[in-house]
Image (spheres, helix red, strand yellow):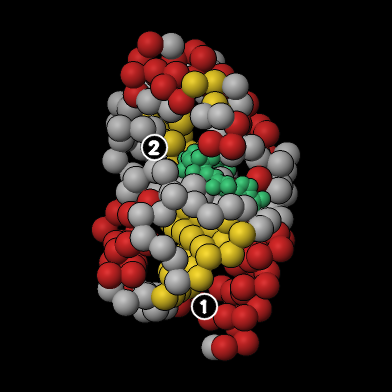
Amino acid sequence: MTRIVVLTGAGISAESGVPTFRDAGGLWEGHRIEDVATPEGFERDPDTVHRFYDARRRAVANVIPNAAHRALARLESGIGPELLVVTQNVDDLHERAGSSNVLHMHGELRRALCTWCGARPAWEDDLADRPPCPECGERMLRPDVVWFGEMPYHLDRIEQAVVSCEVFASIGTSGAVYPAAGYVALAAAFGARTVELNLEPSDAIVPFDDARAGAATELVPAWVNEVLAGS
Ligand code: NAD
């Protein structure tokens, strides 16, 4: 059973050198969200969107997990499957730090989605040159990233964990993107203790029981130590 749900956002990867977008005035690496993170943007200009995610995929391959990702992996080593990490991030830094119980609700950069047959193959290379799908051979691959207006992944499993957990911790997320932003209220309504670890207090719709402001690489290892000491 899930005892602790940790929701992570772009802030946890910031100190690994992966920029967040809300901190950059609503731009993601200089691009407008409507252009690179919506189905309409992809329909309008697929070449730009492919080039954008190809660059993100390459950039993420060249960074390493930081102390916050490693601390969550240490927490999983300590309490096992009682910890579920739900991430909004499309990077794979949690897995590379050693976490295995991770749900990517907004998809993964290192996976492609075939819009013809629905296959979701692991993907390391560029998509801009329209490689064929390894399953059906059609050249209809897109990044397996959930764009604004699309349905996030694993919602049933996440909601089930959020309503039954004892502790809900939100790390490095601005609380601006739904449905993730609503999970703190849901967890609180079902009796969980809620904790926020973020550079600055977020715009959460309900106050956290414990809100700590600071860098993830400092706050997360300290919080994990407390949890392990108390369990
Ligand atoms: P977000 O909404 O999760 O906001 C980032 C939050 O992190 C802000 O509240 C900021 O104060 C906080 N933060 C920044 N640096 C921090 C640090 N060092 N320690 C602790 N907190 C810190 O994220 P976003 O950038 O608005 O992105 C939302 C969506 O964009 C994601 O859900 C994802 O799909 C996509 N995205 C993913 C990545 C990634 O995979 N690393 C990066 C950028 C955007």
Residue 11 x/y as whole percent: 59, 48
Q: Is residue 9 above or below residue 185?
A: above
Q: Position of residue 121 (x, y in %)?
A: 45, 39
Whether the residue carrying mark 2 lies under 8 Å from ligand 1 is answered with: yes
Between residue 182 and residue 224, name the one nearer to us: 182
Mark 2 residue element: loop
Q: Is residue 170 above or below residue 81?
A: above
Quadrant in which the C terminus appears: bottom right
Q: Which residue is at the front of the view, 126 or 198?
A: 198
SS type, badge 1: helix
Position in image of residue 220 (x %, y %):
64, 66
Question: Quick check: which quadrant has ligand 1?
Answer: top right
Name the residue tied to disc 1.
Answer: 80
Q: Given this view, does label 1 or label 2 mark the residue nearer the observer?
A: 2
Q: How many numbered marks appear?
A: 2
Q: Earlier in the sequence, mark 1 or mark 2?
A: 1
Label 1: how many residues lie within 10 Å, few (<14), some (14-19) or many (20+)?
A: some
Q: Give the camera-side residue of 88 and 201.
A: 201
Q: Quadrant of the N terminus?
A: bottom left
Residue at horizontal 37 percent and vertical 75 percent from the top:
192
Q: Residue 146, labelled with which disc?
A: 2
Residue at horizontal 58 percent and vertical 56 percent from the top: 198
What amino acid type is highlighted by mark number 2? Val
| Viewer-side residue, 6 vs 131 | 6
Within-10-Å neighbours for mark 2: few <14, some 14–19, many 20+: many
